Structure formats: C-alpha cells, structure tokens
C-alpha cells in the first residue's frame, strides 16, 4: 500500500488556503467524504468540476488511497483552523495580496505566496504539523485507555 505523504499534504493544503482557496477542505469534505455530486459542490464553491476533481486527485495521491483521504480530510480541516488566506478574492473578482496590496492573477497566487511569503507559509505548516502531532498523541492515549480497561 502507498504511504501517506503527510508533509506534502500539509504543504499543499497550507499553500491552497494562503493562496485564497480557503474553501478547499470544505469542498473536499462534501465531495469526497459525504459523497455529494461534483456539479453541486463545484457550483457551491464557484469552481469547475474539473478543478474539484483535480483537488480530490491530489489529496488522494498524497494520502496514499481514497480511503485514507476520506479519513484525512476532516483531520486536515481541524489542523488548518486559524490558517487565513493572504491572497484574497475581492468584490470585483480579482485576487489581491493583503500584505503587498497588489493584484495577483488567481493562477499565480500560490507562486506569489511561495516566492514572497515563504516564512508565513512555513510558520503555518509548522503550526499544522504541531497540531497533527497533538491529535496523534490523543489517539494513542485513547487507545492506551481502551487497552487498560480491557485487561
Ligand atoms: Zn504578497
């Protein structure tokens, strides 16, 4: 079975959110976890079905399997709480970097973050990895409790 590339997953999610696609995990939860139709979900988040399937594909690849992706999406959602977009969609539909105060093309927004706001990107990745460690520890502690009470 393919291994989960958690660092790559967290990296991908952080970059997407900071780049303005902060609906990513909500959309994936509805499409991948709850099994809602791609057309409905894509319409709701104002993206194309093609984009939605692309996001799902990337998450599944990095998770190692679809089953793992379904389990990981809610966890990724929990650990990315507090990650706020740097590039935001403004009222006229253009994307603007809230730090540089410049208009960025939507397709360049992630490149912009990588290039000019790498420190913020890394801070958010580290924060998410720490939260993930906490969740892992909690799961292990719960298992330990179960084992103790069963013996
Ligand atoms: Zn900027």
Image (spheres, rainbow, N blue to C red):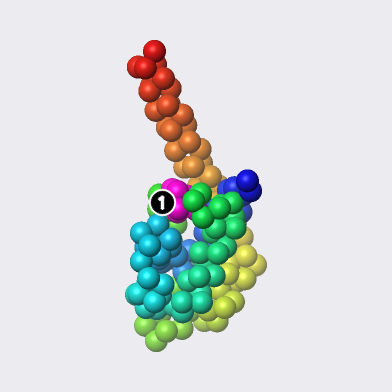
Position of 137 relative to 41 (above/below): above
Q: Is residue 45 above or below residue 66?
A: below
Front in this rendered view, residue 126 or 98: 126
Can see residue 60?
Answer: yes
Q: Position of residue 37 (x, y in %)?
A: 37, 70
Find out whether residue 89 is within the magenta segment: no
**Can you give x and y, in whole percent of width and height, for residue 135 in the image?**
44, 38
Q: Nearer the viewer, residue 61 or 100?
A: 61
Q: What residue would you read off at disc 1?
A: 74
**Residue farthest to the top?**
151
Q: Nearer the viewer, residue 82 or 99?
A: 82
64 lies above or below 54:
above
* Residue drawn where x is 37% and y is 17% of the image: 150
Q: Which quadrant is the C terminus positioned in?
A: top left
Mainly helix, strand or loop, the magenta region?
helix
Depth check, front residue: 117 or 41: 41
Residue at image location 47% in from the left, 42% down from the top: 131
- Picture quadrant where residue 30 is located: bottom left
Q: Tell me which segment is drawn in magenta.
A: 69-75
Identify the residue at horizontal 44%, vertical 73% (top origin): 88
Residue 97 appears anywhere in the view: no
Q: Residue at x 44, y 57 (%)?
A: 83
Element under disc 1: helix
Q: Is residue 15 above or below residue 43?
A: above
Rendered location of residue 29, percent (x, y): 39, 59
- Residue 70 is one of the magenta-drawn residues: yes
């Amino acid at each position: 079975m393919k291994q989960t590339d958690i660092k790559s997953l967290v990296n991908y999610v952080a970059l997407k959110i900071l780049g303005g696609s902060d609906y990513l995990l909500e959309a994936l939860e509805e499409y991948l976890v709850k099994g809602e139709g791609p057309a409905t979900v894509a319409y709701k988040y104002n993206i194309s079905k093609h984009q939605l399937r692309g996001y799902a594909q990337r998450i599944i690849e990095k998770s190692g399997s679809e089953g793992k992706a379904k389990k990981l999406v809610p966890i990724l959602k929990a650990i990315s709480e507090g990650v706020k977009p740097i590039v935001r969609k403004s009222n006229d539909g253009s994307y603007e970097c809230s730090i540089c105060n410049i208009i960025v093309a939507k397709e360049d927004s992630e490149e912009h973050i990588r290039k000019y706001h790498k420190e913020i990107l890394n801070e958010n990745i580290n924060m998410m990895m720490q939260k993930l460690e906490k969740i892992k520890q909690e799961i292990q502690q719960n298992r330990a409790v179960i084992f103790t009470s069963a013996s």
